[in-house]
Each structure stands twice: as C-alpha cells, then as structure tokens.
C-alpha cells in the first residue's frame, strides 16, 4: 500500500479517533462515517475472508491516508463498527454467553460478523440473541437468565436484525413480545421507533403485514387459554360437581373481564399467582384436571405461534438454529 499518498481530505472536520481502538503500532486505518479506527490489517484478514480479499487489493496511488496509514472506508454504522472491531481486538469485550452484554453490542457484532463472515463471532452473537427469545415453551415460561435485557422500544430493531442475519428462530418470541407491548405502541408501529439518536426504525412492509395479522390471531387465542375454567363442565373424579362448577364459572366471569387489558399476552394470562388465588370451593381433583387442561392450551398456543406469524414450524426453526449455532 502506498504511504506517500494524499492525507485524508479535510472536508470532514469532525473526524475522531475511536477510543480503545487506536493502536499506534498497527498500520491500517478503518473509517466508518466520521470515526477512525487504527488496527491490525493482518489480524482482521486472519478473522475475515472478506477483509482478507479487500486488503489484498493494492491501495491506489492517490488513495486516502491518515497519519501515514492507508484508509479503508466502510459503509457501516460507526456504532456497529465499534462493537465489531472491539469484539475482535479486545478479548474481554464480547465474551461468550452467559457473560453479560447489551443489544447495541449484539447488534453491531452480529450484523458485521454476518456481513464480513467472521463465523465465531456470528455464532457467539446469535447465542446471546437467542438467550432472550427461546424456541421452547418451558424456556419462555421459566427462563434461564438471558445475557442481556431488552426494552420494548428495541423489539422492532431486534426483529429487523434477526431478518437481516436470517435468525428466523427468534422471530416467534419476538413477534409475541411486540404484540404484548402493542397496546402502548401502535403509534410507534406506524411511525417507527427511535434507534440510535433521531433515526426512526420501522418494520419492513412485509413484516408489518405479518405482524398485524399475527397479533390479531394471538389476541383471538386469549379466551381459549382460559377455557379450562369452564370446559369440560364435569371434570373426571370430582364428587362435588355443582359447587366446583359454580366456583369455576364465577372465576371465569372475573377473568374474562380482564381480557380487554391482558388479552394480548395469552401465555401470561394465567400463572402461579392465579392458581394460588383460585376459590377454595374448587376441589383438589378439579384443580389438578384444570392444570392439565391449561398446560394443553399453553402447548397448543406455543406450537402454533410461528404459523400465526407466517414463519416456518418450530421443527424447521430448531434445525436452522442448530445449524447456525453448531
Ligand atoms: Zn371438583
């Protein structure tokens, strides 16, 4: 590469050196927007076949330089580039699951490791992403701690990221979560949510259509998740049918009154607290039968969740996940 070439044009006075990613003994400057990173081209090339090919091409004679180093310009967001390059050059920055991380980091590392084919980082980032959006019902209802937390305003960027890197197996749980937050976020669906400053991020047109149809279907299921309260009327083994059924119907009336508010989250409609609050008039035999029937309803809802959002079935999604994380 030619080091006698022109220095970086002064047309961008707000250029800044990246903190923690400016190694004076390295000879390559990477530029993403107005941020400059001085790193080792050889290490980058050893991790990424895309960079290997890119750096093999001789630098043009009048190519840009900065402090004597050739400059490679990337079209990527500097926040993504920072996360990606730190993951490569700082071994403590993005440790494997279950080490804690955050969405900004996962976003940058996953997006760019996918683009520049850094397989080990792609797998690591996918495992972090998947830790919050499981494919199994048990993992949803009784989750192992995820390595990061997510605010509802980040669900749309997370869906877009999953689409971009073909991590379809996280989408059912992501769409489900978006639906549970929809009553408060209809406007943001239409307008987009702020992501990284003032930029608004929206779902793609096709995902918006899938989501609107799927969230309607999700809400339609709410009532069937409570059906165990009144159906079947006579539960096998119960010897106090009239008293039990009367109490079950009273509970149904109360719970159905909550559906307007809670109907978007069928999986959370009934949980441990609700079992504890059941009227004592219902006999233990009925409670056991009701628990089995509620579990069947949960299983059925979860099994159909991908189909509601026009995604492949769980079996296919699991295969994709196994292939990507292997
Ligand atoms: Zn009973």
Image (cartoon, rainbow, N blue to C red):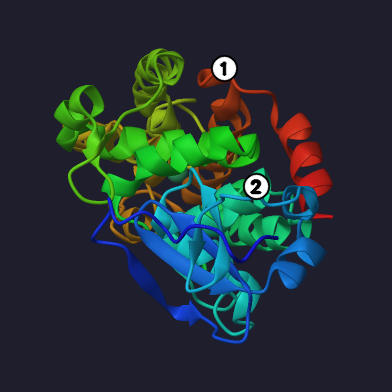
Asked whether residue 32 is in view, the answer is: yes
Q: Which residue is mark 2?
A: 60
Say which residue appears at 60% left-offset and 75% top-offset: 98
Q: Which residue is mark 1?
A: 310
| Rendered view: 79 above or below 227 | below
Q: Is mark 1 within 8 Å of ligand 1?
A: no
Direction from residue 323 to residue 295 in the image, left or right: left
| 1 and 2 marks in contact (CB < 8 Å) | no
Looking at marks 1 and 2 on the same chain, the residue that comes earlier in the sequence is marked by 2
| Front residue of 146 and 269 | 146
Query: Image quadrant for the N terminus?
Result: bottom right
Q: CA distance from mark 1 to mark 2?
A: 49 Å
Quadrant in the rendering for residue 204: top left
Direction from residue 126 to residue 278 in the image, left or right: left
Direction from residue 249 to residue 296 in the image, left or right: right
| Front residue of 134 and 227 | 134
| Residue lying at the far front of the rendered structure | 4
| Front residue of 282 and 3 | 3
Q: Residues within 10 Å of mark 2 (few under 14, many from 20)?
A: few
């Amino acid at each position: 590469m030619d080091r006698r070439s022109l220095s970086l044009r002064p047309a961008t006075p707000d250029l800044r050196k990246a903190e923690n990613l400016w190694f004076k003994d390295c000879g390559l400057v990477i530029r993403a927007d107005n941020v400059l990173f001085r790193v080792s081209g050889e290490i980058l090339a050893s991790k990424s076949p895309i960079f290997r090919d890119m750096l093999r091409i001789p630098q043009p004679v009048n190519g840009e330089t900065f402090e004597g180093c050739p400059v490679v310009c990337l079209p990527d967001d500097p926040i993504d580039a920072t996360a990606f390059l730190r993951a490569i050059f700082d071994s403590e920055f993005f440790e494997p699951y279950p080490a804690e991380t955050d969405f900004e980091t996962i976003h940058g590392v996953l997006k760019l490791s996918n683009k520049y084919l850094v397989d080990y980082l792609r797998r690591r980032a996918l495992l972090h992403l998947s830790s919050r959006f499981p494919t199994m019902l048990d993992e949803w209802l009784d989750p192992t701690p995820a390595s990061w937390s997510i605010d509802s305003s980040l669900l749309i960027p997370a869906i877009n990221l999953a689409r971009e890197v073909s991590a379809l197996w996280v989408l059912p749980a992501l769409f489900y979560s978006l639906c549970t937050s929809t009553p408060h976020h209809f406007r943001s669906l239409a307008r987009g949510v702020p992501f990284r400053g003032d930029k608004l991020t929206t779902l793609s047109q096709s995902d918006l259509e899938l989501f609107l149809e799927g969230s309607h279907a999700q809400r339609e299921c709410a009532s069937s998740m409570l059906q165990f309260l009144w159906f079947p009327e006579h539960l096998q083994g119960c010897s106090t049918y009239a008293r039990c059924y009367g109490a079950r119907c009273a509970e149904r009336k109360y719970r159905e009154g909550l559906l307007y508010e809670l109907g978007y989250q069928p999986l959370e409609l009934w949980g441990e607290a609700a079992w504890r609050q059941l009227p004592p008039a219902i006999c233990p035999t009925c409670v056991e039968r009701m628990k089995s029937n509620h579990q069947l309803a949960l299983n059925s809802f979860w099994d159909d969740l991908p189909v509601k959002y026009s995604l492949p079935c769980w079996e296919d999604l699991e295969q994709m996940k196994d292939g990507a994380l292997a």
